[in-house]
Amino acid sequence: MAHSDTVTRILDSAESLFAERGFAETSLRSITAQAEVNLAAVNYHFGSKKSLIQAVFARFFTPFYQMVEASLDMHEKRHPEVILTVEEILRFVSRSISKVSEGDRRRLAIFMRLLGLAYNQGQGHLRKFLQNEYRAVSGRVMDLIAKATPELKDEERFWRIHFMLGAAAFTLSNMEHLRAIFEHDFDTQCTEEDVVAMLMPFLGAGVRAQSGL
Amino acid sequence: MAHSDTVTRILDSAESLFAERGFAETSLRSITAQAEVNLAAVNYHFGSKKSLIQAVFARFFTPFYQMVEASLDMHEKRHPEVILTVEEILRFVSRSISKVSEGDRRRLAIFMRLLGLAYNQGQGHLRKFLQNEYRAVSGRVMDLIAKATPELKDEERFWRIHFMLGAAAFTLSNMEHLRAIFEHDFDTQCTEEDVVAMLMPFLGAGVRAQSGL
DNA sequence: TGTACATCAGTGAACGCGCGTTCACTGATGTAC
DNA sequence: TGTACATCAGTGAACGCGCGTTCACTGATGTAC
């Protein structure tokens, strides 16, 4: 698929509208209206709404995962045999998200909101798509976390990784709403970076907690 | 609204279908078909789909919050001045959920899945509904958590409470899916109670982590 | 250089479908006199 | 006790609407000879 201007405009609009309202609640008509392209262009370029959703994801995740791969490669080359802590691993991941968002504050929020939606809306095809496309990289991150937490049984580590994923996806995908509540309650500003900085030690401590079994 | 058999049947079907597929993806036709009642009965009894969603929530949350109130009252009467730990507070809440689900394993899963959906789907009206209806009880729980974590700044506690909420809502609302992955990966059974037992120390340790600011 | 054809991005209008909602209606039960 | 009326749960069929998708079409650009 050649990346015509129309394709990019559709992806941009779809990305922001999906993040704002969810998948089912966003119509192709609203996407094409915002993108100022013809309604039929979506099906012409992407084939279906489902494929458009996957294309929006691929545009985010492919460079993100490449960035994670690349920075892990570089680190391992420079410091072979060094075992990373969970916080360091999380920092690799979060720095890759930041880099891929290219400084665009909005894209970072969109990224996580989409991830949260993928799990919470009836989009089984998306979960499968993500799992298949990016199995290699997520497997590598899992292995690193396993090395960082040798004291955990595999079973308990599995769940704790998903607890982390949940806390992150929920927080970041509801970021705008939560920040609005926060600023109302405390009358103080609070950036996304602040929240991520607070999230890291929470996740790290949770993962290292004494076993609950 | 008199609780006729029809009303109960609609609520039962709506509850399980919403939890299974989400709100937007569940049509009134599928609800009334499963409930074996007339399509028009939903609008007759509830007025609109929106109000049906809120009624489904109210049926869950009202007894749940009453249960939390009652058990906190009882505990404070028996042990006044005792400061609860975060884990103890969480156990009060989770035991109330269990009691309200009346031993019905499915209802516990549905409960959390609905809560997750309320945050993640475009249901702003639901969040507001929940916040307004149940402000009293959630405020009381917040205060208890504040007493349990006097070392935290209010701002950081706010975020950590939402990290906990996120981890819990995400995990429990995707429980069925996550358990399927787990059983595939490890070839072992795993009950909801097991997962909740593992979640508690994760959340407790996260909340008590050293400050990230 | 000129002509014929192919390819391709994009268009405008319509399609059929499933949706939430409405409405005139039924039939059972309760109430007043 | 009998009759007239009111209330209420529930029904069947239709309404209009917005949806994703389709299709015949246009007009620009590239390619072959």
Image (cartoon, coloured by chain):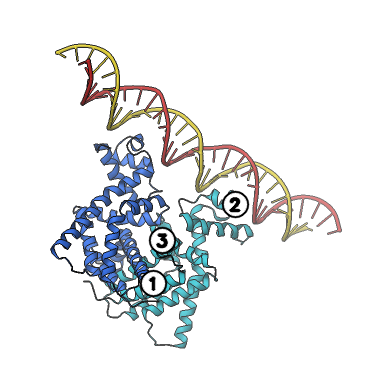
Chain colours: A blue, B cyan, C yellow, D red
Q: What numbered label is drawn on residue B181?
A: 3
In percent of the image, x 41 and y 52: which residue is there? Answer: A124
Q: Relative to A100, does residue B163 appear above or below in the rendering? A: below
In the rendered image, which quarter is residue A173 located in? bottom left
**Alpha carbons under labels 3 and 2: distance apart:** 39 Å
Q: Earlier in the sequence, mark 1 or mark 3?
A: 3
The quadrant in which the N terminus of chain A is found is top left
**Alpha carbons under labels 1 and 3: distance apart:** 17 Å
The mark lying in front, picked from 1 and 3, is: 3
User: Is residue C21 shown left or right of residue A107?
Assistant: right
Mark 2 is on which residue type?
Answer: Ala
The quadrant in which the C terminus of chain A is found is bottom left
Q: What residue is shown with label 1?
A: B199
Q: Earlier in the sequence, mark 1 or mark 2?
A: 2
In percent of the image, x 41 and y 61: which residue is there? Answer: B181
Is A142 in front, or is B28? A142
Mark 3 is on which residue type?
Answer: Ile
Q: Relative to B112, does residue A52 appear above or below in the rendering? A: above
